[in-house]
Image (cartoon, rainbow, N blue to C red):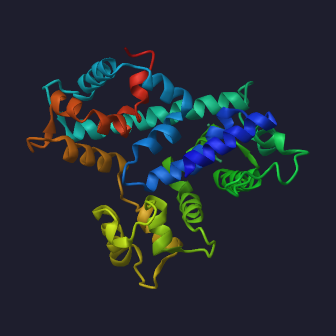
């Protein structure tokens, strides 16, 4: 769904001559951050398209399978911090934390420079709006809409609201710290409420302000044509039970804002640890609770679709191989 939306936006952008692909991707990242954040079931295609961005996905896909594996092997040696030949859960968790941090810092840095070439202390909303949404001026309502019913106007409104949330001293300008919260709210505790709200809005297709069971399932699983509930894979059946048993705590048949918050942003939840546990569980063929390089290379696809390789991006970094 997001991929289609991204392509639709990108195509519109080409015809209208605006905005840049990079900006469109960032707008989509806004949407996909939250989506990925709550997506416990890894969808490789989604990770690739939405997270790598087209350029990076390309350079990584251009590597031969042998070269990709060789590079993953180099990364495994780095993850194994104590050099005992095994990747432990803690080493993997630390590594994932490190790649997350690096990705976010580089991303904020890049966007900060782009919107603020003179490196002033602050970016005003007006400057940001002009840079990103200036193309909207003079466009007709139909140009502003794409066939998914998603409009640039909605993206602008969402950015405007998020800007407010990030602007802690309410001067309508963001300094670098605040701008980091704006770009990556998932990484800032103070932005939790807006992440919850945007997530709820994304899933709530009928816009009644709450998430039904069908919206919850529809967000993570698209059945094939003619498929019935009985044909659904087990993990989807489990999600249905999760919804009734754990997500909808007040048992009214819906998830409201509080329930969405408990779901995607429980205060103590550690994403790096959850991801590390998931990877160890999936790759640990001999169940000794640590991974050898061989076990990791055997699950090459899993690791390339994970945060451990920055969703494959780490393999394509020019400075490391
Ligand atoms: C940005 O402003 C906030 C207060 O709104 C402050 O806490 C933070 O340290 C500032 N960051 C920078 C880089 O100046």
Q: Is residue 185 left or right of residue 280?
A: right
Can you give x and y, in whole percent of width and height, for residue 206 in the image? 61, 72
Is 220 located above or below residue 100 in the figure? below
Q: Is residue 25 left or right of residue 81?
A: right
Is 321 located above or below residue 307 in the figure? above
Is 16 located above or below residue 205 in the figure? above
Q: Residue at x 66, y 44 (%)?
A: 8
Can you give x and y, in whole percent of width and height, for residue 133 in the image? 78, 43
Can you give x and y, in whole percent of width and height, for residue 227 in the image? 40, 66
Q: Residue at x 50, y 69 (%)?
A: 215
View extreme (right): residue: 138
Q: Residue at x 28, y 32 (%)?
A: 300
Q: Residue at x 70, y 38 (%)?
A: 11
Which is more toward the observer, 255 or 237? 237
Residue 179 in sight here: no
Q: Is residue 70 left or right of residue 185?
A: left
- Counting every numbered tag in the picture gives 0
Can you give x and y, in whole percent of width and height, for residue 321 in the image? 37, 14
View extreme (front): residue: 226
Is 321 located above or below residue 43 in the figure? above
Residue 191 in sight here: yes
Quarter assignment of residue 138: top right
Ligand 1's quadrant is: top right
């Amino acid at each position: 769904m997001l991929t289609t939306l991204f392509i639709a936006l990108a195509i519109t952008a080409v015809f209208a001559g605006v905005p840049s692909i990079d900006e469109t991707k960032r707008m989509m990242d806004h949407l996909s951050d939250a989506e990925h954040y709550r997506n416990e079931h890894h969808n490789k295609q989604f990770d690739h398209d939405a997270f790598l961005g087209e350029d990076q996905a390309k350079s990584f896909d251009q590597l031969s399978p042998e070269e990709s594996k060789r590079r993953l092997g180099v990364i495994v040696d780095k993850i194994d911090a104590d050099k005992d030949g095994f990747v432990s859960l803690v080493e993997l968790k630390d590594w994932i934390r490190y790649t997350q941090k690096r990705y976010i810092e580089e991303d904020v840095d890049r966007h900060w420079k782009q919107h603020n070439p003179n490196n002033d202390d602050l970016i005003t909303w007006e400057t940001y709006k002009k840079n990103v949404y200036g193309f909207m001026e003079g466009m007709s309502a139909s140009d502003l809409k794409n066939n998914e019913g998603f409009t640039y106007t909605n993206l602008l409104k969402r950015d405007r609201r998020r800007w407010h949330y990030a602007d802690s001293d309410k001067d309508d300008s963001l300094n670098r710290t605040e701008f980091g919260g704006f770009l990556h709210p998932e990484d800032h505790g103070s932005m939790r409420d807006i992440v919850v709200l945007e997530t709820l809005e994304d899933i709530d297709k009928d816009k009644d302000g709450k998430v039904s069971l069908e919206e919850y399932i529809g967000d993570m699983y698209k059945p094939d044509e003619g498929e019935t509930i009985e044909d659904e894979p087990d993990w989807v059946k489990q999600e249905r039970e999760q919804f009734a048993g754990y997500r909808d705590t007040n048992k009214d048949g819906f998830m409201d804002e509080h329930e969405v918050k408990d779901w995607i942003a429980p205060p103590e939840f550690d994403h790096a640890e959850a991801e590390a546990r998931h990877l160890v569980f999936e790759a640990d063929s001999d169940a000794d609770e640590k991974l050898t390089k061989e076990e990791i290379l055997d699950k090459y696809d899993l690791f390339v679709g994970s945060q451990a390789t920055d969703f494959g991006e780490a393999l394509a970094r020019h400075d490391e191989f």
